[in-house]
Amino acid sequence: MRLDDFDPNAIDVGDQSGGRMRMPGRGGQVGCGTVQSAMGPFYCPSDNGIHIDTDFYREMDQKLGAGGDFARSYVIAHEYGHHIQTITGLSDQIRSLQQQNPRRANQLQVRMELQADCHAGVWAARNKDRIEPGDMEEGLTAAHSIGDDTACDVYMQ
């Protein structure tokens, strides 16, 4: 499924970048290698795809307390944020900086994750007429519970 074929109520793509979304279930081969359940959702720049193991949503709900349709959509919007970073060239710039200064690599990655969160927030704002009571809390819980940047909070203090 191409991202621009995705339900516009779930995510507003707004470009012709050729991104795709794939829900491989319990595994499979993608442009970045083999998908495994434990990986969680991720964006693969090699195939411009968002890959989400559908079991991840169950884990979000049951183990992390981050369930609900808005939380799921937030995850997709965050991963789409990484697609935006790739097509704008930002990802390549950050990878280059990380190679030039390995001590800052983690800090730079945290900033990439926070920017992807920002893109997800823009998506939420553009769809505010569809937000129901409790949705914002679902999204914030998802961001806090599964955010790639939560392990690195020390860099942001």
Image (cartoon, rainbow, N blue to C red):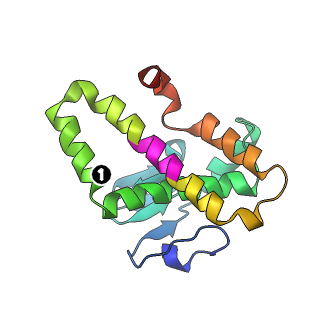
Residue at screen point 69% across, 51% down? 71
Q: Which residue is mark 1?
A: 91
117 lies above or below 101: below
Please state the horizontal and vertical placement of residue 65, each as a whole percent of the image: 75, 37
Give the structural element (helix, strand or loop) at label 1: helix
Give the camera-side residue of 42 and 24.
Answer: 42
Residue at screen point 24% across, 52% down? 92
Q: Give the extent of the magenta segment.
A: 112-118
User: Is residue 93 within the magenta segment?
Assistant: no
143 lies above or below 105: below
Q: Is residue 77 left or right of residue 63?
A: left
Residue at screen point 39% across, 76% down? 18
Amino acid on which the number 1 mark rests in the picture: Ser
User: Is residue 117 within the magenta segment?
Assistant: yes
Q: Is residue 89 left or right of residue 24?
A: left
Please state the horizontal and vertical placement of residue 57, each as a whole percent of the image: 67, 50
Q: Quadrant of residue 6?
A: bottom right
60 lies above or below 3: above
Q: Is residue 156 left or right of residue 147?
A: left
Give the camera-side residue of 65 and 29.
Answer: 65
Q: Quadrant of residue 101?
A: top left
